[in-house]
Amino acid sequence: MSHRLAQGGRLIDRNAPRKFTFNGKHMTGFAGDTLAASLLANGQTLLGRSFKYHRPRGVVAAGAEEPNALVGLGKGDRFEPNQRATTTELFDGLVAESQNHWPSLDFDVLALNNLVPQFLTAGFYYKTFLQPRAFWKHVYEPIIRRSAGLGKAPSEKARDPDRYEQIYGFCDVLVIGGGIAGLQAALTAAQSGARVALWEQTAHWGGRAPVDGVEIDGKPADDWVKATVETLEAMENVQLRLRCMGAGVHDHGYVLGYERLTDHAPESDAPRHRLWRMRAGQIITATGAIERPLSFAGNDIPGVMLASAMRDYVVNYAVAPGRDVVVVTNNDDAYRTAIALRKAGVGVQAVVDARAEATGALPEAARAHGIRVLTGKGIRKVKGGKRVTGVEICRIDSKGTAHTDVFSCDAVAMSGGWSPVVHLWSHCGGKLTWDEAGSYFRPDPDRPPLGNDGKGFVRVCGSADGEMGAVLANAHEAGKNASEAAGFKTKNMKPAQDAAAPEAPMEPVWMMPRKAEYDLRMKMWLDFQNDVKVSDIQLAAREGYQSVEHAKRYTTLGMATDQGKLSNINGLAVLSDALGQPIPATGTTTFRPPYTPISIGAIAGEARGPIFQPLRRSPLHDWHAANGADWEPVGQWRRPYTYRRAGETRDQAVNREVKNARENVALLDASTLGKILVSGPDAGRFMDMLYTNMMSNLKPGKCRYGLMCNENGFLMDDGVVARLDEQSFLVHTTSGGADHVHGWMEDWLQCEWWDWKVHTVNLTEQFAQIAVVGPKARTLLERLGGMDLSPETLPFMAWADGQIGGFDTRVFRISFSGELSFEIAVPASQGRAFWDRLTAEGADMGIMPYGTEALHILRAEKGFIMIGDETDGTVIPQDLGLNWAISKKKTDFLGKRGMEREAMIDPMRWKLVGLETLDGSVLPHGALAVRPGKNANGQAITEGRVTSTYFSATLGRGIAMGLVERGPERMGEEITFAGDGDKHIKARIVDPVVYDKEGAKQNV
Amino acid sequence: MSETLTSALPGAEYEGFVTVREAGLQGMITLRGDLGSKALAKAVTKATGCALPAQRQITTEGDHALAWMSPDEVLILCPHDKAPALVETLSEALAGEFATLANVSDARAVFRLSGAGWRDALAKICPVDFAPLGPGDLRRTRAAQVAAAILVDGAEEVRVICFRSVAQYMFDLLKTAAAPGSEPALYR
């Protein structure tokens, strides 16, 4: 059984105990422990159940590559599934639970799946999905939903209380990985004067060199690590970050980093995670290497671990994985584990070495420690269920039908060699080359990810580069080359000298024993997390999956949250073998960011709650809020839909506002309307191109309504243009369209008509704009006084500057309601005071504000179109009967050619008409007009649709506009609209203008 | 009139690891034109006392300043109540030039950030390398989801300008970025 050793543990503080619970059981660890280390120290080797077969699983690794030891962390609002116990730092009060078991971790009913493994072989889902169909829905899916999967999702009511943020960083050289190679590379680069950032995903500098007994300049690696970190910390040009993972390398040296600030200290008020968005001139990845498991039967039973992980637990945390260990290997490195275990007083039954002989320095040292070494052998199978109880040994080149030795043990250390972590090199296109001696893919320095200059911008050093021995010279070279590529001169410095015991060559073993029969192969796990075995890959190959990418998806190899960090090379080696081709011919699957999963919180950053997105507020926003506004989003603006009074429904409020505007005097906050100044000697010419109608002949002091189309002739925006002077126009746009129209103007001016002398300035927010509407509007304004607003001086469609009630105003005599109307712009800083003054002066006249819904009804009664209602990006002005606003004199304008296309002049196009239901009801919004019969697809035949529909308080019945096939030619005709279900609604085609057709009311 | 004038977020203030204050009303005039024109430079300097700024720079003279906005645009900063008259003066002086003037004093909100950590706070919301920025420098950028201009006034003093309608968003954003405990210690 795993347990804490009496002495040692370079990362733990025995004076700082930490209490935590696992499945409700109280346990204690030490500061510096990972959750995995402290669980093992408490004898907890069984940590969860596997994805498909519900097999018992324990810790395999000691770092980011861990596939098995996933737990649900935290409670309630802070619960998170699938957290790796190996990268979770222990803190007081940590709450963890195991995953994917029912009813309990120890007794799992669904482990029955394990008894019929044929049931869930590769491609199971695809095969069962085919036939019989009904079986999938009623039999397989309910079973799979219950049994497959990892952690459970947080409660839908959970609201993450933590803070997250993002940050933009910049540096000349970014070094990812704070092992000794990364430290050396950073040191070399920093001494050139370059701005250097160094990220390390764990909480400690130095990587695994201290565990592996590396000596630097004749001293233990820890000494050099400490000194180097101190040197770097003292340098102004260096940024060091622990607990910061390089998540992804993207084009132009853009790197995402995932900094976990308070996962280990949840009581802190700092943000929990910080997402780094780093622009690096040059990137060095010093991401190390990951040990590979060996594929033998029962290699997933709790107690079987990577050899390197086992020595991490012993050396770093003083945790022994068991009392008696068997080490199985195909290389010299694993002997370090045997020696470390022996030194810590843990029993080592034997080292089982697949190689014919083992005579290197490390095997000899192991023998000198009295450790038995078996060569030419492998594990036939691991015995045990919820934990290892022993191993059977057989000859490595056999079928494994008989065993040669049997050991009783409670832990197995396995080493199938090492694979460089090439993920970050590969993210942006770096290519790999197969290293025959080490049996791994390593970065090909001749084919790096290329920057905009065609040169590589990522370098690799240390074991990530495939350097499995001394790394500092290689790291120094990377630091030097990167800083020089970033434009800095490196000092003539020498790197430190690192030395480790020499190693004899490894010998690839992809299946143990090499000729294993099916019953063994179907118990050899490749991908622990997704439950993919050697037999599954072989089955896929037999079924014709030759591409590694296809085999991956068919078997789900490498598709779990660990993205196959342990299984990748082993899986494609088995596939290559099954296909009878060398491994490099099979190639690897694509490495994609992020390197390990990152939190959604980090991706969202600060964008949550009140700052989820910007909310634009008019200068009168606070007044609206204080006066019952029901808000409506209009672009990013919030506009009052209506102002409800006590006891009123929304509809009652709208109807009250409509009637008041028609009969009395009313105010509308029109501040959100776009206001763009177009000015310069060529402004008239430019305006004639922008609008379908003529604008250049508009006289200063006058206003004109105009339409803007895109190049395809589709109606894009509309509004009133005021000519300010000979060279200047003020363009009013829709509220939602202002920024787009401004960008549209600049696009044409900067890219196409760059030689035209025209400037644009977006003045939208400079003004508060208030529409004073209704028969008594003039009376009210005259009370404030200051300007002659008589129809003689300021007729309909004119504008004038002046002072009203002491405010600086520009008054436009325009009307979107059909009533006498003055739209008055004042500087935004005067807006609130002006509005307050109007409401005060108009109090005895019954003045009231109206919202966007009343605005819509007022305009619909007048048959005025609304961009976004009558238009949807496929509607041309002619569809809306706006031919009068399309100039026939102009040789060109934007959209002219587009609206001459065949489909646009088709007489069958749907065109704007008014619609009047026979029963006076309000048509449903968007309802389709249907004709008897069906089309070729069996659908109803449609001949039109509703674009605007309201209850008109003025007329006391429903009014609507719609686009109907040849509509204007069919005045008086009755057509049918489809309502809910089978309901049909009859409506008559009428004139869209149902109020004051001749315009007498607005022109007074 | 002045007693009824309101800026976007009067009195808004937050003490984080930098202090954020709404700066009140600031006169601003957009001038678009040929910044290489001697006549334009002469007229602007005569009216404001400031020389035309170089790219991404601000020039200041008394209570007037010029901020480079784009290759054909400068922002003239002046006392809020002087802006209308200054537009008049400049319009007359630039009558023969292809130049456009607009009083945009009320279109914006201005926030003042005080404290040594301003770079660290802004680094969380602006994709800008703040290391080389010092007094007299200006950057137009975005702050999270809205447009922003950053004017560096002193070693520990900057102004952030945004559109008036998003003043509350900007203030909330700056508060979040400057929240105590979240110091990234990026710039030192």
Image (cartoon, rainbow, N blue to C red):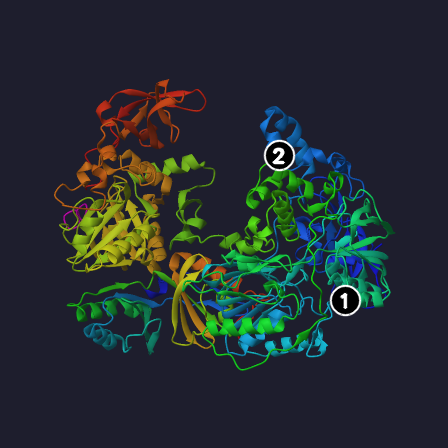
Which of the two residues, A685 or A843, is positioned nearer the viewer here?
A685
Q: Position of residue A718 (x, y in %)?
A: 27, 44
Q: Position of residue A854 (x, y in %)?
A: 35, 39
At x 31%, y 32%, the residue is A954
Which of the two residues, A480 or A619, is positioned nearer the viewer here?
A480
**Residues at marks 1 and 2 on the same chain:** yes
Q: Is residue B69 visible?
A: yes
Q: Position of residue A396 (x, y in %)?
A: 76, 50
Nearer to us of marks 1 and 2 is 1
Image: magenta residue range: A788-797
Q: Is residue A35 above or below residue A139?
A: below
Q: Earlier in the sequence, mark 1 or mark 2?
A: 2
Q: Secondary structure at mark 1?
A: helix
Q: Is residue A597 above or below residue B17?
A: above
At x 59%, y 33%, the residue is A126
Name the amino acid, label 2.
Tyr
As for residue A108 lying within the magenta part, the answer is no
- Identify the subunit bearing mark 2: A
Which of the two residues, A137 or A615, is positioned nearer the viewer here?
A137
Q: Looking at the rendering, which quadrant does residue A845 occupy?
A: top left
Q: Quadrant of the N terminus of chain A?
A: bottom right
- Disc 2 marks which residue? A125
Disc 1 to disc 2, C-alpha distance: 47 Å
User: Residue pushed farthest top?
Assistant: A933
- Disc 1 marks which residue? A362
